Image (cartoon, rainbow, N blue to C red):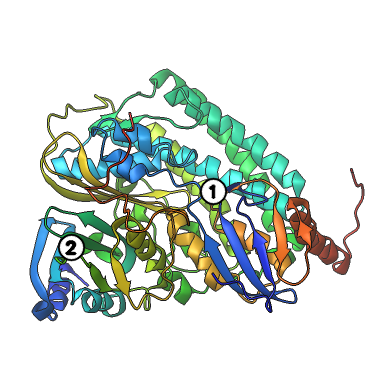
Amino acid sequence: MDYEQLKEKINTISDMLIKVEQTLPKRLYLLCESENAYKVSKFLFEDLKARFVTTTGIDSDDCYEIIYHFAYDQLSTFINIKTFIRDRNKPQIESIAPFIPGAEWIEREIHDTFGIEFNNHPNMRRLILADDWPDGKCPLKKDYEFKKLR
Amino acid sequence: MKISLKKPVLAIGPLHPLQEEMEFFQLTVDGEIVTDIDVRIGYNHRGIEKISETLQFDQVPYLISRICGICSASHPLAFVQAVEELAGITPPDRARYVRTIINELERIHSHVLWVGLAGHFIGYDTVFMWAWKYREPILDILEKITGNRNNYGNVKVGGCREDIDDSIIGEMLKELDKIEKKMNMLTKAVLDDPILQARLKGVGILTKQDAIRYAVTGPTARGSGVDIDVRRDDPYAAYGELDWKVITQPEGDVFAKAVVRLLELFESIKIVRQALKKLPGGPIAVEVKQIPAGEATGHTEAPRGETFHYVRSDGGNRPVRHKVRAPSYVNVPSFKASCIGTNISDVTITLAAVDPCYSCTERLAVIGGSKVTYDGKELLRLSRGKTEQLKKQLGFKEGFKFE
């Protein structure tokens, strides 16, 4: 498949996307609402056969961002699904772990570090935080105060 | 995990008895057969992503080379590539070659280390002694180039810190010839051994389908027939200009992973040799003024698989978000697919086959029902006992036993 065909394939799901950005020749960002992230990930993983790499959680000023990184190795391209969770009080998103078991750990980690709920996750327990860590203290949030490191 | 008292749970950890990191495996067993596995991590979490947000772009490579002592070249390289992508910097040719040489030497010493450890676990201490002995000259070469045997600290945004002195290239090439001969001997000794074949073939199989679902990378994926390698799929440094090939094996068992690693050694030696011969002249770094706002991804092929870094900048001198995904993070959960249905005596080597970085100490206990406590020696005894049994079955006679 060449780049044009990839673009055509991505256009078939354009109703689920807000925008497609190409920051560099080999880096694509598909922006979508958080309700559609599950379907877009499923499309990339099952229809395009892209390789799941990882998920990144980011605490932006007014929302949480979740970026699903997929590698499309035959075109040396990273396809990133960027989605926004605007409800900061009760952040939640659909889990992709039911069809990508490789995403199970990273979703547990994002749950630990950002407090984001992943609905329908098969095994939502703590991954990296200790059992006696207080609930609701999420270390990667920007408002988390931690002792000065240096 | 709720531990049911009806089903015996075999706990390995939290300090893994044989390897060198703190991870806790709870195996639910039915007799000798593993029916479920639960992995707990986080005992050694250092919050590197958070610390990275407090450091400047040129300080971060020092921090992240300490994520792993062995992958201390590939982590910084992935980060630096992401930042260079963000700032639109192309490193000079010589820097790309120096990066390639250091990364490949790292792969050689890491794979040799694994071969040694794997040999030790199944009762082949000679393999262990050989492998670790032959690993030393590689570390010496790395020390000559960067000043350190590990934690090289040689890569920076825009190029490299230390150059390779042209006068030692001849010496390094000679050393590589010697290493290649020894690796040949080691590879033949391991791959042609009938007992090792009987011991490792068909053990801990990870199917191609599971490898894709669990998103595993590196030799773990290539040993299951998944043909991926960042060095070829998204060429970085100088890999696109050198002649080498990706090794894959379709079987998915421990033996296939050993084959992939051993044959990759020769490809790596080939890459280093070519890179040393083609090493272009010129500067090793360009000046970097400012990192603009934006986001970028960088990935490299570490010895254990793909290392992935995501960096976001707001135009200041520190990253606002730095995400790191090390290869073992996706390789370890695949135990759920490869360990279930295997015998307890095969678990040690199956867990070791993805080459996770573990810490060796000594606690293994059976909880639930009986109160038997084993230690690391017991794990070794189980694993080696099976090898001994196979030797007997194959009519192998022990000539001399040194206790």
Respond whether the residues carrying marks 2 and 1 are from the same subunit: no
Q: CA distance from mark 2 to mark 1?
A: 37 Å
User: Image quarter for residue A118?
Assistant: bottom left
Residue B163 in the image: state x and y as whole percent. 35, 23
What chain does mark 1 sit on? B
**Drawn side of residue A145 relative to residue A133, left or right:** left
Quadrant into which the N terminus of chain B falls: bottom right
Q: Nearer the viewer, mark 2 or mark 1?
A: 2
Extreme residue in the top direction:
B167
Kind of residue at disc 2: Arg
Q: Residue at x 15, y 62 (%)?
A: A29
As drawn, the label of residue A61 is: none
Kind of residue at disc 1: Cys
Q: Nearer the viewer, residue B291 or B137?
A: B291
Residue B251 in the image: state x and y as whole percent. 56, 71
Is residue A20 at all visible to an observer of this figure?
Answer: yes
**Drawn side of residue B315 relative to residue B107, left or right:** left
As drawn, the label of residue A88 is: 2
Residue that numbered label 1 is attached to = B357
User: Image quarter for residue B145?
Assistant: top left
Residue B60 in the image: state x and y as whole percent. 30, 35
What chain does mark 2 sit on? A
Residue B62 to residue B68: above or below: above
**Drawn side of residue A69 relative to residue B88, left or right:** right
Q: Residue at x 54, y 27 (%)?
A: B140
Please say if the residues under marks 2 and 1 sit with CB atoms less than 8 Å apart: no
**Drawn side of residue A146 relative to residue B124, left or right:** left
Secondary element at tag 1: loop
Density class for disc 2 (Cα within 10 Å; few <14, some 14-19, many ≥20) is few
Q: Residue at x 35, y 65 (%)?
A: A107
Secondary element at tag 2: loop
Residue B297 to residue B95: above or below: below
